[in-house]
Image (cartoon, rainbow, N blue to C red):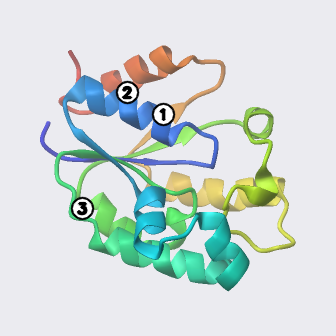
Amino acid sequence: MDSSVILVGMPGAGKSTIGLLLAKELAKDFVDTDLLIQLREGATLQDILDKSGYLTLRAIEEAVLLAAQYDNHIIATGGSAVYSDEGMQHLCSLGPVVFLDVGLTELRARIHNYDQRGIARRHDQSFENLFVERRVLYQRYADITIECYDKDQNSLLQLLLARLPGAAN
């Protein structure tokens, strides 16, 4: 399996955590597009939001996604990557897109810093509204959906490996 695997999902879904485990298991490099944004801008996601707003962050994210030339990588995307159709089409050309589907209640339990986490959203947008809005987009681009309800990291990794074409051990 020489293609990349692209992970999408809400903030707190475990894209970076599962991505690192998957990269190790499949002997692939790992990249987190949120980190690429921060390196490019020399600022945290929250700093970008505070200074320039969520639409600017999404535009920067789109530029980072379109510049991504990562063959044979596990790519953990920011939760808002799916707002860029052009960026997602580019990522789709690199390999399968996996949606880590975590329920709202579990996400709420995982995210304690919603207002400081650097989440690209309208200022007045609740987490629940954001969840509903984005879930449709994650489903639109997903080649594979992994239901993460009541599963530990190892179970998720094994389930993902079983579902990825050519990755089964």
Q: Identify the image quadrant of residue 152.
A: top right
Q: Nearer the viewer, mark 1 or mark 3?
A: 1
Q: Earlier in the sequence, mark 2 or mark 3?
A: 2
Horizontal and vertical percent for residue 127?
80, 55
Horizontal and vertical percent for residue 69?
21, 64
Tell me if residue 86 can be seen.
no
Mark 1 = which residue?
17
**Residue that sits furthest to the front in the current view:** 42
Horizontal and vertical percent for residue 46?
67, 66
Mark 3 = which residue?
93
The amino acid type, in three-letter code, at marker 3 is Ser
Mark 2 = which residue?
21
The amino acid type, in three-letter code, at marker 2 is Leu
Give me the residue at 42% from left, 65% from top: 39
Give me the residue at 67% from left, 74% from top: 49
Give me the residue at 60% from left, 65% from top: 45
